[in-house]
Amino acid sequence: MATFLYKLGRFAFRRRRFVALIWVALLAVAGVGAATASSPAADSFSVPGTESQKAFDLLGERFPGSKADGATARVVFKAPDGQQVTAPAQKQAVEKVVGELKSSSPQVASVSDPYLAKGVAKDGRTAYAQVTYKVSGFELKDDARDALKDAAQHGRDAGLTVEIGGNALQAMPETGATEVIGIVISAVVLVITFGALIAAGLPLLTALIGVGIGVSSITALGSVLDLSSTTSTLAMMIGLAVGIDYALFIVSRYRSELAEGREREEAAGRAVGTAGSAVVFAGLTVVIALVGLSVVNIPMLTKMGIAAAGTVVIAVLVALTLIPALLGFAGKRVLSRKARKGNAAASEADGGKPNMGTRWARFVLRRPVAVLLAGVVGLGVIAVPASSLEMGLPDDGAQPTSTTQRKAYDLLSDGFGPGFNGPLMLVVDGRGGKDPKAAAAQVAGTVAKLDGVAAVTPPTFNQAGDTAMLSVVPKSKPSSTETEDLVHEIRGKAGDAARDADARALVTGTTAMNIDVSEKLNDALLPYLALVVGLAFLLLMVVFRSVLVPLKAALGFLLSVVAALGAVVAVFQWGWLSGLFGVEQTGPVMSMMPIFMVGVVFGLAMDYEVFLVTRMREAFVHGERPGQAVVTGFRHGARVVTAAAVIMISVFAGFIGSSESMIKMIGFGLAVAVFFDAFVVRMAIVPAVLALLGRAAWWLPKWLQRALPDVDVEGEQLQKHLAPEPAEERPEPVKV
C-alpha cells in the first residue's frame, strides 16, 4: 500500500492543475445540486419491529388520509390573573383564534375547540386547542407556520397568554457563533504548529472543500433519500474534524521529508506513502464505526452514519490527492521563514534540544506504573456518574425556557398535569372479531382503572368500524420512568383485555415511540460494540502486526468513552456546570448518545492510535529497541497529534452553542471524549503500557503472521523500492 500511495502522491504533485481542477469541479457540481434540490420530503423517524411502529402502520392503513405521523401543534391559552378562559370576553378571543387556525392553511387537517373537546382546565384559567396537519413537520410550509404564529399573536393582542407546543414549529437547529470560533481556534493551532501561514491554511482549505462536497451532496440527495436535518450537521462536524487532522498529518510529514533534504516531488510521494497509509487505515476505522450504526436498524441513524462515513471517505481522498497537489503550488512556503532561510534549529539527531514529545516519552518510560495508575484511576473517577445514566428522547420539556414550546409545555403541566404533554395513542384492532365496539369499550375501561392513567378519551372508529383510536393521558411527564412503566403496563393489561374480546391492542404515540427507541438502542449497544470493536481490532492487527497493541487500543477507548459518558451525565442530567455550557434544562441523556458516542469516538480515537503508534512501529521495524521506538514515535508525532486533538476538540466544542439540545449534547460528548482519549489514553496510558510490555507489545504468532495480509503501513517495502540498485560490474576494456 505504501508503494501505491507513494506513486499516487507523486502523480498528484506532478499533475497538480488537473487534480485541483477535478476537486473544484466536484465542489461546483455538488453546490449546484444542493442549490437546486428541493427540501426533504419528510423528517421521518421509523423504528421497524417495534409495537409503536406497527400501530403507526396500522393507523395509516385503517385511517387513510389521517396522517398518523403528521405535524401537530398545541395552542395553549391562559387568562390574565383573576380571570378565566370561560368568561365571555376570553371565550370570544379563544374562539376567534381557533377559527383563524381552521382557515389558516390548506395543510391543516383539524383544529379542536377547547370548549367542545374538554380542553379547559378545572380551574378555568387554562385551555388548549389541538391543531393536526396533513403533512409531517418538515413538509409543513413556511406560510402554515407563519399563520400559526400570527393566530397566536392575535390571541396575545386580545390580552391572553398564548404559547405553541408540538413539532409544527420544528426548525433547522442553529449552531451559533461558537462553530465559527471552533474553526478560528483550529487556524490558530495550525499556525502555531507549523509556523507558516501557507502550511496552516492548507488543512483548513482542504477540509472545507471536502466538507463542502459532502454536505452539499447530502443536501442535494436529501429529498431523494429522505435525510433528516441532523444528518448534514453530523457530517459537517465529523468531516471538519477528520479533514483537518488527515491533512495535518500529511503536511507535517512532507515538511519532515523536506527537512531531510528530499526534493519536493519526492517528499510529497514519501509523505503520502507513509503518513497517507496511516490516514487510510484511520479513515477505515471511522467508516467501520459509522456504517456499523446500521446494525441498530433505525433508518434515521443508519442514514446519519452512512452520510457521515461518506464525508470521511471524501476527507481521506482529499488528503491523499488534493494535499500533494496544493503542496506543488505552495513550493517551499509551507516551511517556516527560519527553515526557508536555513536557520532552523538543529534536530535531535544532530545534537539539538529534545522537544516536548521526547521529554514526555522519557518521563513516562521512567515511571510507567505511576502514569498508568494515574490515568486509569483518574478516568475511572470521572466515569462514576455514568452508573446513574438515565436515557430518553428529548421533548418540549428539554427546550430552553425562553422558547414558546417550553412555555406551552409548562402551561399544560400546570393546568392539566404533566401527562398532557405526552398523551399515548391506543389502537384497538377489532377486524375479524365479533364486536369491535365492545372490544374497544372493554380495553378503554381496563386502561382507565390503571393507577398511572389520568384520563382516557372515548374511542374514535374508522369508516369500516373495525378499528378504534383512544387517547390515554398519563399522570406523569413524558420522559419519566413512571410513564415508561405505564406504557408496559398498558401493553400488558390492554393486550389481555383485547384478546379476551377477540381483538388486539397496540400502544403508540410520540412518547411510546421514544420509549421503544430507547429500549431498541439499549438492546443493540452490546452487539454493536462487539461488531465495531471486533472489526477494528482485526484491522489494527493487520496494521500493527501485533495482538496486544490493538487490544490495548480497544480497552483504552472503552475507558475514555465511559468517562465521557460520566461527564455528559454530570452536566446534562445532574446539572453540574450546566450554566457554563448553556444547558437550561437538565433531564435524561438522549437515548442514542451512548451508541452514537461508541461509534463516532471509537473511529476518531483510533486515528490517534494509528498516527502515533505506526511511527513507533516504523522505528521498531527499522531496528530500534522498544523503548527507543516509543521515544521516536513521540518525537515525531506528539506535537502533531496534540495539535490534531486540540483542533478536533475545538471543532466539536463549537457545536455546544447549538440551539438544538441533541446537537449540543453530541458536541459536548465528542469534545470531552476526544480530550480524554487523546491526552490521557493515547499520550499517557499507551506509552506506559508499551514501556511495560517491551518487545512483547509487537508479538504476533507465526501462523497469524502468515494468515494476515502485509499492508506495509510502516513503509518497509517502500524503502526497498526506493533503495538505489547496485551498479553492475563491467569488465575493464582489454588493451590490445
Image (cartoon, rainbow, N blue to C red):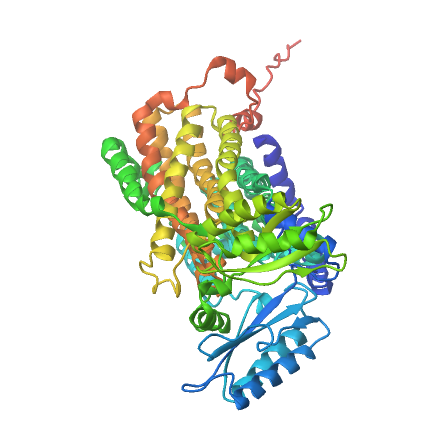
Tell how many labels.
0
Residue 24 visible? The answer is no
Residue 374 location in percent, x, y? Answer: 25, 39
- Provide residue 426's location: percent of width, then percent of height: 60, 55
Residue 153's image quarter? bottom right
Q: Nearer the viewer, residue 348 or 735?
A: 348
Instruction: Classify residue 264 by image quadrant.
Output: top right
The extreme right residue here reads: 464
In the visual, does 691 lie left or right of 731? left
Q: Quadrant of residue 464?
A: bottom right
Q: Quadrant of the N terminus?
A: top right
Q: Is residue 116 above or below residue 262?
A: below
Given residues 75 and 608, the one toward you in this image is 75
Figure check: 727 above or below 527? above
Q: Nearer the viewer, residue 35 or 78?
A: 78
Residue 262 position in % (x across, y down): 51, 39
Relative placement, left or right, of 689 versus 150 is: left
Which residue is at 62% across, 85% downward? Answer: 96
Quarter the C terminus occupies: top right
For residue 237, say whether it is visible. Answer: yes
Q: Position of residue 232 (x, y in %)?
A: 59, 56
